[in-house]
Amino acid sequence: MNKFNLRVYGILINEKRQVLVSDEFIRGGYYTKFPGGGLEFGEGTRDCLKREFMEEMSLKVEVGEHIYTTDYFQMSAFNPEHQIISIYYYARALEPITAPLRDKLFDFDAEQLAIYEKTNEIETFRFIDWDKFSGESVTLPIDKLVADLVKAC
């Protein structure tokens, strides 16, 4: 049986030319990635991304131009029986960001740490200045490829 994990991510660049990333501690590892997540049954990719931004950041976004869809085999970092297919779009905030934004990598606060105790997952968000942003800014292989594509544009 084929097991595919469909993921949808947004590249949000603010007016200061900074790129939004999510710093996460999940399944025993630290990851910096783009905001987004798993496609749910019955959901389109753009609706998925809107839902993910709302769930993660309470942020309404407009989903823009398609950037990239995985076109090679990528095994899941969390389940070797799953193949990851990731779809990336540009995203634009339709309202001011009210979610806490951090300046430092993996800067989790007490409230987030309390959530971790219940869920074993924790995330926070920060912007990376355009001149410091690259594939090295993110952890996962497909994110690295997309970061370099975005940076080259």
Image (tube, helix red, strand yellow):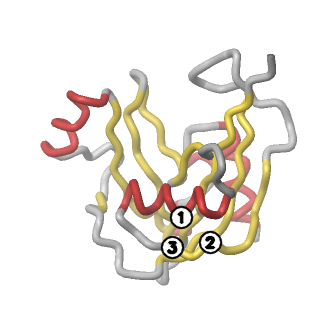
Mark 1 in CB contact with mark 2 (< 8 angstroms):
yes
Q: Where residue 91 appears, x then y in whole percent? A: 58, 70
Looking at the image, tell me whether mark 1 or mark 2 is earlier in sequence order.
1
Residue 92: % across, % down: 54, 76
Residue 63: numbered disc: 2
Residue at which label 3 appears: 61
Kindly identify the amino acid type of the residue bearing the numbered disc 3: Val
Which residue is drawn at the image coordinates 75% and 59% (left, top)? 149
The picture quadrant where one finds residue 30 is: top left
Instruction: Answer left or right for 21 relative to 8.
Output: left
Q: Could you say where residue 31 lies in the image, as x and y percent from the top left?
A: 47, 37
Give the quarter of the image for residue 58.
bottom left
> Circle 2 — which element?
strand
Vertical relation: 40 (above or below) 133 = above
Q: Residues within 10 Å of mark 1 (few under 14, many from 20)?
A: many
Residue 50: assigned label:
1
Residue 88 location (% of width, % of height): 69, 57
C-alpha distance separating marks 2 and 3: 6 Å
- Which sits in the foreground, 135 or 123? 123
Q: Residues within 10 Å of mark 2 (few under 14, many from 20)?
A: many
Assess whether mark 1 and mark 3 are in contact (beta carbons under 8 angstroms). Answer: yes
Residue 36 vertical position relative to residue 94 in the rendered view, above or below: above
- Say which label, 3 or 1, has the lower sequence index: 1
Q: Amino acid at mark 2?
A: Val
